[in-house]
Image: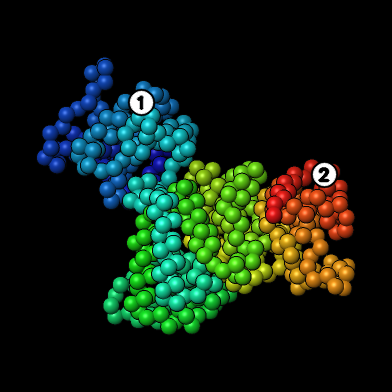
Amino acid sequence: MIRADIISTVGRKYLTSNIENDEFSYPKGFSAAALPFNPIRNKAKRSFEKLDIRFVKDNVTVLIETKQNFTVADEEQLSAYVEYEKALTGNKTVAILANTINDNIKVWRGVVSDSDLMPKETALRTMDEYVDFYTPKINDKEKVMQNTYKLNELLHRHSVPEKLRSQFVGTCLLALKKGLDYANQTLSTAQIRVRIREVLEDLLISDINKAAKVVLLNNNVLENQYIKQLSISAFREILKFIEDNILPFINDKSTSGQDLLNLFFVTFNKYVGKSDKNQAFTPDHITDFMAKITGVNKHSIVLDPCCGSGSFLVRAMTQALDDCATAAEQENVKKRQIFGIEYDENIYGLATTNMLIHSDGNSNIRRGSCFDFADLIKEAKPNVILMNPPYNGQRIHLPKSYVDTWAKDKKEDPSKGLYFVKYIADTLNSINLHAKLAVLLPVACAIGTSGEIARLKKEILEENTSRSQRFRMLYGV
């Protein structure tokens, strides 16, 4: 990796040098600060004084020492520069050894020691990302869960209906993450709602369905009569509670923080009345298990054709991001590798909000029946399908060609969701695309030996085994 590329990747505007060739002399730096310089020497009595590349932003310094092909012996030199930096500025440090003959790097957060080594860091990041290594936020699951309950009680006290709470909280989280200023005493409730809507518009700026999504979220949440009638003091109290008691305990720059954010969202949905839950919220331990058995990684293109609130998509995105080595890889996952389809309008809005909360780059979720999106599925070319289809789908939810085969008195899908699996498999097979499918189905699909269940099971296995398709069907109540 050449020097110019290193500087360009981390950010030239943060480069700090005090001698020629963009290097940094610590003796000169100490002299300028009127501090005594005490050189650190190796066993050969050689002192380490000039760092190759140094970047500073806020209270974080990134130190990069380049070698043609670094070895363990070079860690002593880098360690000396970390000690100098702490004595000179007191800054938190990210220390990096970088090869010039290839792209190999070795990164430490803090001192150069085994405990501070970051083995998953295999590519250079931007300065902003290195600053995020030291974000003051923490992941405190117990605190978040305790405050989730208190938040629900607060919304109940201010007469926000159960069925509206998840969407409202999600929208408030989005706005607060983007720095919503609500404390100005001159603002009215209406003005705060306008500011939140502006945040939504900015977040969806690259989304081809931006207008429809903004209208939906605006109508379902911001223009809802219960939200409009909130007093300004109540609105501020709710926003302040989320800002003070939820956001500080979730560091969503980390994978564990993304998991905790998802747990918060799923847990909050548990307070919604059963009549409003439908089948939209798959338990977190199930989404985690299914993402793992399908091996979701940074190369996966994931589709949930019945995505509900987006739990599978969030879990898959988090797991894929954890496999990425660079910000560019993470951005590609967010923008081009996560797809969902949801029929119900309200739950579709919830899924959109859920993905945006997790910093999804494009919110590739479409509203409608998955049976109307064959072209989208083919264009996306997913190689992992995660799905919890409706087990009691009504006539309106399924294609007329299939519904016409039901007995006249039949009101719900006799296949208990297997027809969705058959449709997805057939769609992928039509373009000869192999994929892994993990599908959550009721026990009836496992033990059924007659009718639609038996017929579809037989067809699915016959038509896909020969194509080396890999299926996982998880049966549960």
Where disc 2 sits, the SS reads: helix
- Indicate the position of residue 213 as horizontal and vertical percent values: 56, 72
Location of residue 441 (image quadrant): bottom right
Q: Nearer the viewer, mark 1 or mark 2?
A: 2
Q: Can residue 268 be seen in this view?
A: yes
The residue under label 1 is which amino acid type?
Asp
Q: Can residue 11 be seen in this view?
A: no
Answer above or below: position of 213 versus 304.
below
The residue under label 2 is which amino acid type?
Thr
- Indicate the position of residue 399 as horizontal and vertical percent values: 80, 69
Answer above or below: position of 119 versus 215.
above
Reading the image, the residue beneath label 2 is 465
- Indicate the position of residue 52 as horizontal and vertical percent values: 32, 35
Quadrant of the image containing the N terminus: top left
Give the CA separation, mark 1 to mark 2. 54 Å
Answer above or below: position of 68 versus 371.
above
Location of residue 88 (image quadrant): top left
Q: Which residue is found at the position 35% from the left and 50% from the top?
A: 135
Q: How crowded is mark 1: few (under 14 residues within 10 Å), some or many (20 or more)?
A: some
Quadrant of the image containing the C terminus: bottom right
Answer above or below: position of 427 versus 93.
below
Of 117 and 459, nearer the camera is 459
Picture disc at residue 51: none
Q: Residues within 10 Å of mark 2 (few under 14, many from 20)?
A: few
- Indicate the position of residue 288 as horizontal and vertical percent values: 58, 48
Reading the image, the residue beneath label 1 is 74
